[in-house]
Image (cartoon, rainbow, N blue to C red):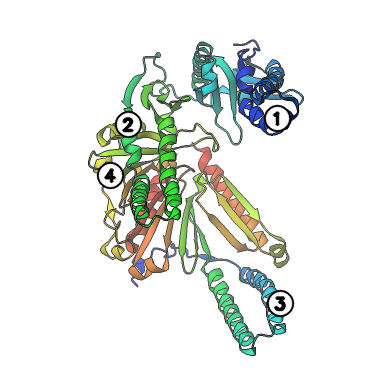
Amino acid sequence: MTQPRRTNPLSPLVQAAPALPAVALFLIGPGAGVVERSGVPLAVLVVAGAVLGYAVFVGVAWLAWWRRTFWIDADGDLRLDSGLLQRSARRLQLSRLQSVDIVSPFVARLAGLVEVRVEVAGAGDSRILLRYLTRAEADELRGHILELARREGEAESAQPDRGGLADPPGPAEVLAAVPAGRLVAGLLLRSVTAGMLIATVLLLVVTAFTQGPAGILLALVTGGLPILSVVTEFLANYGFRIARVREGLRIQRGLLSTQSRTIPPDRVHALSIISPLLWRRWDWVRVSVTIAGVEDDDVRPDVLIPVAPRAQALRLIAEVLPDVDVDALAFVSAPAPARWRSPLAWRLLACAITPQVIATRSGRLTRRTSLAPHARVQSVRVTQGPWERSLGLASLHADVAPGPVSLTARHLAEGQVRPLAQEETDLMRRARLLR
Amino acid sequence: MDPAADAFAPPAAGWTPVSSRLATARRITLALAYVVVAAAGVVLAWTPLPRGWLIGYAVAALSILVWAWWVIGRRVRSFGFAERDDDLLVVSGVLIRRLVIVPYGRMQMVDLRAGPLDRRLGIATVQLHTAAATTDAAIPGLLPADAAALRDRLAARGEERTSGL
């Protein structure tokens, strides 16, 4: 590990692969002209051209591969030197490690290779992507980096007790897995998807009577969009498994490309328990999470579990937010006048503050309970629109890091909101001081 | 209304208001926009439309101007902030009222901003940033010296509170 080395020599072949269809498409247009004049079959021309074009891209990728080396230096930093003309030297301090992930994109998987992503805490681009290594190399590197990070972390912070981190590596204990059938059913029965599919059926029935072409076109949109989203989500979440490992919770998922991502429990900033109307007869829920870190990261996990029985989901939540009993939250509900502002959802609107977390509840068709530990809440806001004012209501917001979860308790009694905001502010301050 | 029930009641020390120069700045911007409105009126006068249209246009434009002029005054007077021992409170808004509470320990950065018009009038904006994008705590219309002092105080308190981790 301490010697500079290159990634796997097959990497250029994989990296140039996305160019293949582009080259082929590019050739079909001008190629047609050549076919007319020379009589060479179009297919031969396209294949030959694509191979040639691919070879050029592989050549460039090979040069870049040749000039790219990585190693772990004497200070325990991960280093990456790269660049063909413009050289760049990147250095990640492993004591600030946030995650090491192994991802296997589709083409790389065909070549038996994986990508390793190493991320440290810090603003901007604070990660290194190693494309590509064999599975065994990647596992070895990952183990090595985690080991180094733990040793340095322990040396730096004088906290010997870091949960289970000091334990020897044990087998991953699978906490939950999502069967494919339940995943499909769950995706189809999400409120928006189900609504659009029902609308499509109605539209088709109406069109059958009126025989207008406009209805068919509209049905293609209302039917096509939800099916597209179901397929994408299915591909992404197929084989979803969440396991407890030494570093936190490990999520593996994906059909065409497998993702493997670790959530350190102390980086969960907020989470939402979401239950669409049509899931409730099976008592299924989905759990979204906000994990702090790099903002534009395509593999940043935002789902703790895509669809699971509520009891199982609550056990998962207990892994990341111990000492919080979601079913025992003492909610302060919106008062009766809130029905004039929000006639469907007003009975559910509520806010709860416990010694550990702030929780908000909302939604009618899709119910949503969101939680955030006080140490993660950044600021508290109170807002009041004109209609709320005339009803004596106000809304409470707890601001958390950007992500899928937002905490808003809408239309509470005006007299209760300010004391709640004050209580939350006090708890936030103390929570941060304790750390 | 019963004062205890007011969600936007001032803290014990009361709200610190912002400078009325902020209203001047906003009214100048409004006046600049009205140059365009007036130009449209001149064009309207050249068209062969009946006089009534022009009068209607002028009445509508003038009443909106008067209303906006008055709203700017109210909106600027609605701004207020209070520095408490552990947090900063910012209140704003007339139609939609907002109150933001930011504990000093959560502040990541304090910005001081002043556009060309602001600089000419002698005002500046202090903006607080936390790890949440939705925090939205800006105090416009501060005198430059006050703004710089406020920023330094906030930054110092933020550091004090976070360094104790």
Residue A127, above or below A387: above
Chain where mark 4 sits: A
Q: Which residue is mark 3?
A: B39
B20 sits left or right of A289 in the view: right
Q: Amino acid at mark 1?
A: Gly
Q: Quadrant of the N terminus of chain A?
A: top right
The residue lying at 73 percent from left, 32 percent from top is A33
Q: Residues within 10 Å of mark 3 (few under 14, many from 20)?
A: few
Q: SS class of the residue under badge 4? A: helix
Q: Which mark is residue A316?
A: 2
Q: Quadrant of the C terminus of chain A?
A: top left
Q: Which residue is mark 1?
A: A31
* Of A122 and B20, the residue lying toward us: A122
The residue lying at 54 percent from left, 34 percent from top is A297
As measured in the structure, the alpha-carbon distance from the residue carrying label 1 to the one carrying label 4 is 53 Å
Image x and y of residue A390, in percent = 36, 71
Q: Residues within 10 Å of mark 1 (few under 14, many from 20)?
A: some
Q: SS class of the residue under badge 2? A: helix
* Of A225 and A420, the residue lying toward us: A225
Image x and y of residue B7, in percent = 39, 63
Q: Which residue is mark 4?
A: A278
- Res A228 → quadrant: top left
